[in-house]
Structure formats: C-alpha cells, structure tokens
Amino acid sequence: MNSEFDFFRRILMQISPLSDESILPVFAHIQHSEFKAGEFPLRAGERATHVLIVVKGLLHEYLLDRDGKQATRSFSLEGALSGSLGDLISGAPALSYIEALEPTSVLTIPWVEIDKAAQLDINLQLLLRRIAERLYDKKRKREYALLVLNAAERLDQFKQEFPGLFSRVPKHAIASYLGITPVHLSRLLSEQRKP
C-alpha cells in the first residue's frame, strides 16, 4: 500500500480497530488538499461536506459573534480530524469557520461517502460512534474547565493538552479558547514567568 493509505489507516486504527476491507471503500474517495496560512477549508454559511485529517500543519475552528469576535472551538494538529461534525450532520449552512493557521496539508473525505460506507459496514459504524464519543468527552472536559477552573488553571490545562502549540497559534485565539481576553492572557503569562 502507499504511504497515504498507511497514514489514513494508522489514524483510524487509533480510534477503532478496522480491517483494510472496511477502510478501502472510504479511502477510495480521499483527496489531498493544501491550504496556505489564512485560507479556509470551511467558512460559516457554506455547506460542510468533507471530513479533514491533518497530515501536516494546523487548523483553527471557531465561531464569530455578532461583533465579529472569534470564539475558538478547537485546534487540529497533525493526525487530528476536523470538519465540524455538527455542520456535517445538519446539512444546513455551516456555523463554523475552519482556518489554516500555517501551511496545512490535509486528506479530505466526502461525508456522504463515509455515511454511505458506514451503512454497509458495522465496523465503520463503530468507528463513527467512537469519534462521536471522543468529541463528546472533549466537549465535556472543556465545559468543566470553563465552568469550574479559574483562568490560570485553564491555561495550565491548555499547555498540557496542546504542548508546543503556544508558539504556533495567535494569542487572541488561545485567549478565546480559554474564555478570557488577550490582555488577561498576557497578565497570566507574565505571572507565570515570575520566579
């Protein structure tokens, strides 16, 4: 098999065991896409149609409020899935933006093909269930952090969850993810640098 298939297989196998026979019908629809920093695989108002797997680079998923201020939902690093599952499932115009924060290479898979293949394969159904469970658990932990932890604790948790991300992401996006202002983030970082 080729290296693209091996990469795709490894990512899926980390989520749920699958045979090559289960993977191949989905892999047949994979496309490779490149995005420059600042380009958007998805913009609010468009229809979400593809699941993305980050091969190299970094994606930032966010919403915009009425004043145009970003509310960061997530970051997708190498090996992570992206694509705004809620927008994919709803079929309605997307609420989310997905932006490449640096040159980013992704594998794209049409959601309709994943759904079609899963209807014929119980192992793919289990994979989708495991993905949904992971997303739910991630959301649960994020909700807990925003409701229970103070800003300094959320910052520490962010650093543990995303090691090395600080140098790759604009500070305003990190502040938004933490539910604080960029000024508050700067203050926290200054306090952490003090001996």
Image: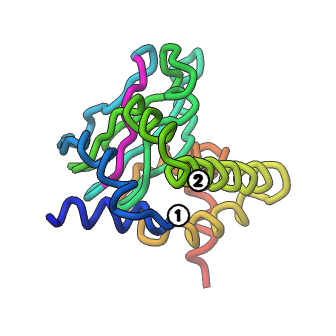
The quarter in which the C terminus is drawn is bottom right
Q: Which residue is mark 2?
A: 126
| Residue 102 falls left or right of residue 83 | left
In this view, the residue farthest toward the right is 148
Indicate whether 193 appears above or below 168: below
Which label is found at residue 46? none
Classify 10 Å Cα crowding around label 1: few (below 14), some (14-19), many (20 and above).
Answer: some
Q: Nearer the viewer, residue 146 or 55?
A: 55
Q: Amino acid at mark 2?
A: Leu
Question: Residue 42: which quarter of the image?
Answer: top left
User: Which residue is the site of mark 1?
Assistant: 16
Q: What is the quadrant of the N terminus in the image?
A: bottom left
Query: Residue, x 40% and y 16% (percent of image)?
Result: 46
Q: Taking 61 as reference, is 105 left or right? A: left
The answer to whether residue 25 is visible is yes
Q: Position of residue 15 (x, y in %)?
A: 52, 63
Residue segment shown in magenta: 47-54
Q: How far is the residue under mark 1 from the one under mark 2? A: 7 Å
**Residue 48 colored magenta?**
yes
Looking at the image, which is closer to me, 18 or 59?
Answer: 18
- Say which quarter of the image contains residue 97: top left
Q: Which amino acid is tagged 1?
A: Ser
Provide the secondary structure element on which disc 1 rests: loop
Magenta span: helix, strand or loop, mainly?
strand
The residue carrying pointer 2 sits among few (fewer than 14), some (14 to 19) or many (20 or more) residues within 10 Å by Cα, namely some
Measured as percent of width and height from the top left, residue 137 is found at 70, 55
The residue lying at 55 percent from left, 27 percent from top is 89
Q: Residue at x 42, y 60 (%)?
A: 12
Q: Is residue 183 visible?
A: no
Circle 1/circle 2 CB separation < 8 Å: yes
Residue 5 in the image: state x and y as whole percent. 23, 60
Identify the residue at the far bottom of this view.
195
